[in-house]
Image (cartoon, rainbow, N blue to C red):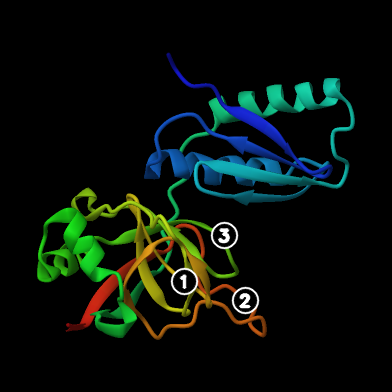
Amino acid sequence: MKRQACVSLLGTTAVLFEAPGALDLTLQQRIWALALECAEWPEVREAVPGMNNLMLTFVRPPETEAALAMLETRLACAWERVHPLPIEGRVIELPVVYGGAGGPHMADVVAHTGLSVDDIVALHSAPLYPVYALGSHPGYCYLGGMDRRIATPRRQVPVVSIPGGAVSIGGAQTGVSASAGPSGWNTIGSTAMAFFDPAQDPPAVLRPGDRIRFRVEGILP
């Protein structure tokens, strides 16, 4: 049975539209297209694409069940209508040092996958990763396209703090931390690039549709 789209309230001034289907680039491109359309609706303050979802904040939020039902129908119709929006963003190369103190969980990925460190680095650095969305914390990018051979479950006990620039694997995804903070992902390397600067306009370096290539700067034991 085909899974239906889901709309849920986020507090009193926002809703979350969750798209049906498995996470892939084509579906995410439809999310980008839906965000552009919804941003033009007069009652919408902001349309923020996420992973497989879209958050809408409102100037005039739906205040009754009937108004929410009308919004759900409108979103469902718009979702059926939109086509994938290919965004040819920038290609950004990130130099990464894999392993060592900056990649404390490399051994856990080795243990889970049965691959060598060299194989993991080769598979991780091979793709050109599309930026699906920004979120979690300012400047953080959710990436698609990781080789499933290096997919590793999230950690059962999260790490209290990882530094900004930590390159990690969580399930079938990889990402780069934009600032220090807690994480349940497996950190396998680090980059010195800064992803967020509130003094810049825009403050986040990356945008949905950009693509990232990890360049191997070194492999440490």
- Name the residue type under label 1: Ser
- Dot 2 or dot 3, earlier in sequence: 3
Label 3 – label 1 distance at C-alpha: 11 Å
- Dot 3 or dot 1, earlier in sequence: 3
State the image coordinates of residue 18 (x, y, percent, origin top left).
57, 35
Label 1 – label 2 distance at C-alpha: 15 Å
**As drawn, is 100 to the left or to the right of 140?**
left
Q: From the viewer's perspective, is residue 161 above or below residue 135?
A: below
- Dot 1 or dot 2, earlier in sequence: 1
Disc 3 and disc 1 in contact, CB within 8 angstroms: no
- Name the residue type under label 3: Gly
Q: Name the residue under label 1.
A: 177
Q: Quadrant of the C terminus?
A: bottom left
Instruction: Determine the secondary structure under disc 3.
Output: loop
Front one among 184 and 125: 184
Disc 1 and disc 2 in contact, CB within 8 angstroms: no
For disc 3, the neighbor class at 10 Å (few under 14, some 14 to 19, many from 20) is few
**Location of residue 201 (image quadrant):** bottom right
- Name the residue type under label 2: Pro
**As drawn, is 121 to the left or to the right of 133?**
left
What residue lies at 79% left-to-right and 44% top-to-bottom? 11
Q: Mark 2 points at which residue?
A: 203
Q: Mark 3 points at which residue?
A: 135
Q: Which of marks 1 and 2 is in front?
A: 1
**As drawn, is 153 to the left or to the right of 114?**
right
Instruction: Determine the secondary structure under disc 1.
Output: loop
Label 2 – label 3 distance at C-alpha: 13 Å
Q: From the viewer's perspective, is residue 172 above or below residue 190?
A: above
